Image (cartoon, rainbow, N blue to C red):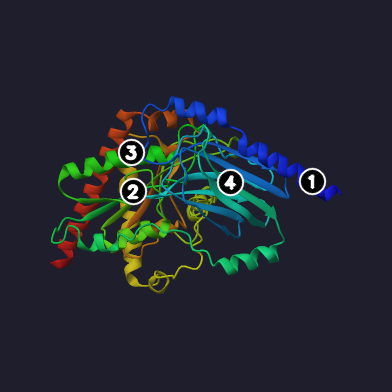
Amino acid sequence: MANRAAHLIFAVASMLLTAAGTGTAQRSATRASAPDPYPVATDTRLGGDDTQTRFVVDLSRKIDLRVFTLADPYRVVLDLPQVTFKLPAKTGETGRGLVKAYRFGLVMQGGSRIVLDVGKPVRIEKAFVLDATEGQPARLVLDLAAVDRETFMRTLALENARPMRAPDRSQYDRDANKGDPRPIVVIDPGHGGIDHGTRAAGGDITEKALVLEFALILRDQLEKTGKYRVVMTRTDDTFVPLGERMRMARTRQAALFISVHADALRKSEGEAQGATVYTVSDTASDSEAARLAENENRADVISGIDLSHEPGDVADILIDLAQRETKTFSLHFAKTLVTELRNVARLHKHPLKSAGFKVLRAPDVPSVLLELGYVSNKEDLKQLTSGAWRARTATSIAQAVDTFFNTRLAGAAAGAR
C-alpha cells in the first residue's frame, strides 16, 4: 500500500511538474525581440525523490532526442539538435532526487547536449518530447528510476552507446595552406560549449567566454605580424574534446601549441593570484599543479564523452627522442613567455610549473598551458575583463612567440654550420 501511494504521489507530482513553468516560458517568449534560428530552451524543472525523478525542459518547438547513460561517474546524456539555452545563471548547479546537478551547451555545430550527474545507477523509464499546444511550450520529459549497479551495467552494455563526436577536421587540416612555409601556431581556448570551466563569483562570467575573447585577440596579434599561420581549436562557444585539440595540432604539423585558461580557487583552498605557465610532466611540480591538471583533464567527462577506450596513438612514441626534444622546446618557450609576461601582467608566486595535462601531450608539438589568472581573485578578474590589459598581454605573448622562433631558427642555422 505504501509503495502504491508513493508511486501515486510521484505520478501526481510529475503531472504538476510537466505542466508547471508555463508562466516562465511565456514571459521568456515575450521578452524575445526576434525569432531564434534554433529551438530555444526557456525553463527547466526537476521533481521526485531518490527512487524516481522527472526532468522537464520547456522548448520553443519540438525537437529530436537521443538519451543514453554512462558509468563511473554515473551520468545521463541527452543529445539534441543545436539548441539556444536561454536559462538563468546557475541553472543546473543544484539538483533534486536522483539528479545531483546538470549542465548544458553546444558540443559541435548543429548539436547540443544536456548531461545529468546522477548519484546512483538509474534506468531511463521514459524520454520524449511533447508538441507545443494550446499556448503551452513544447516539452522534453525524462523519467529516471533508481536501479542496482548490475542492472545498470547490463543495460549499458546492451545499449552500446556511442556519444556524438566533434566533426573530423583532419582532411581540412591536411589540405589547408599547402605550400605556405610560415610556422603554424595553434591557439587553444580552453573549455567551451557544455564545459563552462571555472566561474567568477555570481556565475555570470565563465572561463570559457573569457579565454575565447582573449584567444581571438591573440590570434589577431599574431596574424598581424604576417609571420605565422594561426589555427584556433575553436572560434565560438563549441565543445572540443581534449584529444581532438591535440590531434588538430599534430595533423597540421604545428610548430607551437598554446592552450589558454583561467583558474579559480574555492575560499576553503586559500587565495592565489597571477598568471602561470605550465608544461607537461608525468609528475606535477606541486599539489596546486596536480589539482589543476586533474580538473582540466576532466573536460571529456564533463561533456558526457567517455574516452577511456580510445586508442593510445601517442603511447608508442612517448619514449621517442623526438619527444625529448619537444619537451625541451616547450620549456624554452614557457620560460620565454614568463619573461615577457613579467612586463605587463601579475604573475603567480611560482609562475613556471608542470603537470600531466592531456592537452599538452603531443609528442612532436612544443606545447604550453597558460593560466591568465584567477577568476576567484578580484584584481585578476578586473584585469581579465579589461580590454586594455588583454591587448597588452596578447602583445607580450606575441613577442614571446617571436623570440621563441627567432631562437630556434638561429639555433638551426648554427647547427647547420
Choose the circle earlier in sequence order: 3 or 2: 3
Distance (Cα) linking label 2 and label 4: 32 Å
Identify the residue under disc 3. 214
Comparing marks 3 and 1, which lies closer to the viewer? 1
Distance (Cα) linking label 3 and label 2: 12 Å
Few, some or many residues within 10 Å of mark 1 (<14, 14–19, 20+): some
Choose the circle earlier in sequence order: 4 or 1: 1
Give the SS element for disc 4.
strand
Identify the residue under disc 2. 234
Compared with 187, 274 (above or below) is above
Q: Relative to the observer, which residue lies in front, 33 or 212?
A: 33
Q: Residue furthest front?
A: 134
Q: Residue furthest bottom?
A: 316
Where residue 254 sits, quadrant-wise, is: bottom left
Identify the residue under disc 1. 6
Q: Along the horizontal axis of the image, is 132 left or right of 316?
A: right
Residue 245 visible in this rendered orientation of the protein: yes
Choose the circle earlier in sequence order: 3 or 1: 1
Comparing marks 4 and 3, which lies closer to the viewer? 4
Comparing marks 2 and 4, which lies closer to the viewer? 4
Q: Looking at the rendered structure, which numbered label has been put on residue 141? A: 4
Q: Relative to the observer, which residue lies in front, 370 or 33?
A: 33
